[in-house]
Every structure is written in structure tokens, then in C-alpha cells.
Image (cartoon, rainbow, N blue to C red):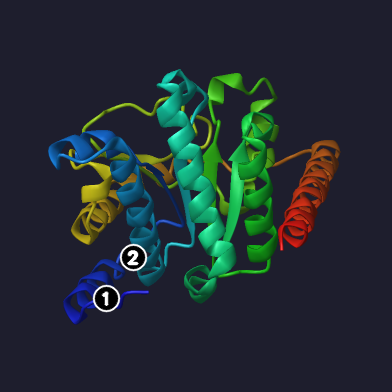
Amino acid sequence: MKKLSWTSKLLCKIVKSGRIPNHIAFIMDGNRRFATTQNLSGHKGHLFGFHKLEETLQWCSELGIKNVTVYAFSIENYKRPKKEVQTLMRLAEKQFQSVIDDPGFISNLGIKIRIIGERSLIPKKLKIIGAKVEQLTRGNTKGTLNVCFDHLTKSKQIDTNLLDQSLLLSENGKADLIVRTSGECRLSDFMLWQASDAVLSFLPAYWPDFKLHHLLWVILWFQQNEKSKRNNVTEIKLSQENQKILEIIKKKRVKNIDKYAQRYDEENITNK
């Protein structure tokens, strides 16, 4: 893990004198366009995007941002060329596998990783590797990284009150700040319920070009605008019946993760 310079730490300390968002969400847009500007393949652009996420998690940890949610892959992304979709999935498998092989970075940050979305659409191998990552990082308590796969809000036909709690974002609270890179000024159906009280920020930089000064700027923007938002925030309270349903959902999820994580262990033993 690369150490921050003393100037970066000083800037973070200054920004931390104001309110820091508890939950920030990123729409990591612009990997392909970044690659085009650098005369690189689309594959390289997405790889740079994965590395940028690691760097961003370190900055968030330094700033005291405990919960991060990223838009990794949506149902709509399946409309892209088949080769590109397969490349993205293999990259995701490789990055999750690197966490299993060398968990030092994630362990040092104390981050718990959770995959959110329509699991039935996730390729089998990625589902198994992802489950093992969730199992291995389950005990980390300093922060949470929610990775949204096959996520499209409009596809969720469920009571909105329960939705806020059951999409596994309930433990993190609603998003305080949502950031989209690449100059696009839309949410693309990302976290629409959780974004109802969020401060929004749209940056022209492509995701691989995202820098610490961009993050510090959007947090200053959040600090400037969050006071007016705070008065309109309504606390979500579940009925006892829905609370019981939520607990069942959580237990079922843990059981499902452990089932696929066991398959990872069994297949690795077989391959040795």
C-alpha cells in the first residue's frame, strides 16, 4: 500500500475539520474513453479503473469515510459487445482472486467487501470467487466496500421501505454523497432510493484520472450543501414484521455466500 505524502495527509486533515460523509457512492465511468485518449485497449482502461478503486479506498480510509459503494456492472452493460463483457468479468475475477491470494491491502484498511445485485446473473466462476472474498473479509469492521453487480433499480419490484434495508446498504445508511466521473450528469438507475437525500457531484475527469484533489473537492462540495439536505432526511423505521423478514434475508444471504465459498475451497483442493 503506497503511503500518502505529507502534503496529501495535511490536505486530508484540513478537509476532516468539516463533516465527512459516512457513505459515498461512485459511478466509475469513463474507463473506455480514458483508454482511447491514451491509445490503449479498452481492457487496459478497465484495468486502470480497478487500480484507481484501490487508490480511492486508501484515500477514503485516510479521510475517515467508512462506507463506499461502487457501480461495477449493470444489467444494461450486457448490451455491450460480448468480448468486452467477458473481459470485464475476467478482470473482476482476477481482482477478487488477488484479494484472496494477498489480503494484506484490504486487511490493513479493515474493509469488509460485499457484492450487491442480481446474483443469478453473475457468471458462476465470478460468483464463487466473490463469495469467498465476502467470507474472508466478513470479520473486518473498519469499513465496507459494496460492489454493485447486475444492479438496476427499476428491476427491484419490492416495497421501498424494506428495499432501503434489505439491499444490504441498510447497515451503511443512505448514501450521503454520490460521485459520477466522465462528465455524464445522470445516475443511470444507480441507488435511486438510497440517493434521495444525497448530495450529487458530476466530474468531467474519467475514472482512471480521478485524483485525491477531486475527492477532496467533492467532499468540500458535500460540506457546503449537506446542511440543507440534512433537514429533509427522514429516518426509516421498519415494522416488527418487516424487521423479521430482513433478518431472514440476511441469514439466507450468509448461508448462500458460505455455500459458494465452500465450492471455491473444494475446487481449489481438486485443482492442486
- Give the labeled residue for mark 1: 4
Q: Is residue 224 left or right of residue 256?
A: left
In the rendered view, would you say 246 is above or below 210? above
| Picture quadrant where residue 12 is located | bottom left
Q: Is residue 41 left or right of residue 116?
A: left
- Residue situated furthest bottom in the rendering: 6
**Residue 120 percent across, percent down from the top left:** 69, 30
- Give the labeled residue for mark 2: 59
Counting the numbered discs, the total is 2
Give the camera-side residue of 56 and 201: 56
How crowded pointer 2 is (Cα within 10 Å; few <14, some 14-19, many 20+) is rated as many
* Quadrant where the image shows the N terminus: bottom left
Q: At 29% from the left edge and 36% from the top edge, which residue is drawn?
A: 42
Q: At 26% from the left edge and 48% from the top edge, which residue is drawn?
A: 208
**Residue 204 percent across, percent down from the top left:** 18, 38
In the rendered view, would you say 246 is above or below 150? below
In the rendered view, would you say 259 is above or below 64? above
Q: At 27% from the left edge and 28% from the top edge, which residue is drawn?
A: 185
How crowded pointer 1 is (Cα within 10 Å; few <14, some 14-19, many 20+) is rated as few
Circle 2/circle 1 CB separation < 8 Å: yes
Q: Amino acid at mark 1?
A: Leu
Q: How far separated are the C-alphas under marks 2 and 1? A: 8 Å
